[in-house]
Image: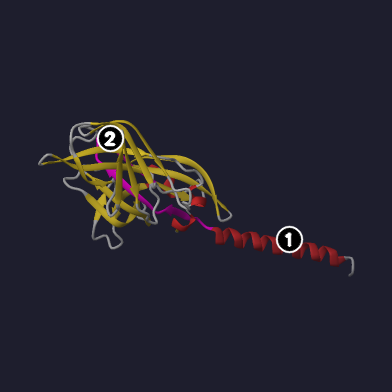
Amino acid sequence: MKKLYPIIGILVTIIVAVIIITVNKVNKGLRYLTVSNHYSYVYSENKKIEIPIYANSASNPLSNISNYSSIYLGSPDQSSKLQIELSKISKNGIEHYISEDYYSFILSFEMPKLSSNFFIEHCFIKIRLQNNTEFNFEIGKLSLYYYENVGFEEMISINSLSGMKSNEAIISRLEEIKIEGSFNGTYQITNIIIGSDLVVTFKEEEGCLILKIDHQDLMLSNVPIIIEYKEGNLSKRQVIDNFKYFADYDILYQNGILVNVY
């Protein structure tokens, strides 16, 4: 009988190991992540809205464009919503987050041409698949602007654009933009806009305009710049198209406080 004890012990160990592995697989399941970001765009031809989604499996229903039926960007209660057209899904690498690998893929949408500006303070992306499965993910804030003559340089002839984060920043967020160029004519800047509900202060230096952006708990890196100014008695506007001022890596790790888990 004593000879059987080691065999019984080995069998029990194997059974327990199998149970643990099985439980872990069940508990793991399929998870999706989004990171709250301020999506701010000004309309121009062929402009794309890009929204990243993360999944803990490379083979998931949202990674295949043929699975999609409809997509809306909307408020939590869907009282304000906008249907958008998915044009492309791009794989964007793997990130490690809380003991798991997450596969990043970017949903690219055609920016719709609207008759007026469109804002959603707390924005969700609602996805319906061909099999009627629905997903509703928080993505942050949405600001869509529609102006004529985007890129036309009347007040400032731009030589370069640059941006930076704060040295103390714990999230991927733009804090300062520097516009270098030649300033044309006599003018008075009255307001600068890069996104809804964002306070932007500015100072002028020789050949340079420096913008300071207030803090919000949202990622921010790709924005347009709308400069409102007066030239004599005329109110004018110069619109600088979207520009991505920096690209961070390890987004999930750097922006853990902004991660939404589903």
Distance (Cα) linking label 1 and label 2 = 58 Å
- What secondary structure is marked by label 1? helix
| Residue 214 pos. (x, y %) | 35, 53
Residue 126 is inside the magenta segment = no
Q: Residue at x 39, y 56 (%)?
A: 217
Q: Nearer the viewer, mark 1 or mark 2?
A: 2
| Residue 73 pos. (x, y %) | 30, 52
Q: Nearer the viewer, residue 19 or 219?
A: 219
Residue extent of the magenta highlight: 29-51
**Colour scheme in the image?**
secondary structure
Q: Is residue 116 left or right of residue 73?
A: left
Could one spot residue 119 in this view of the protein? yes
Q: Nearer the viewer, residue 18 or 62?
A: 62
- What secondary structure is marked by label 2? loop
Residue 33 is inside the magenta segment = yes
Q: Is residue 181 left or right of residue 55?
A: left
Residue hosting label 2: 46
Reply above or below: 62 against 15: above
| Residue 14, numbered label | 1
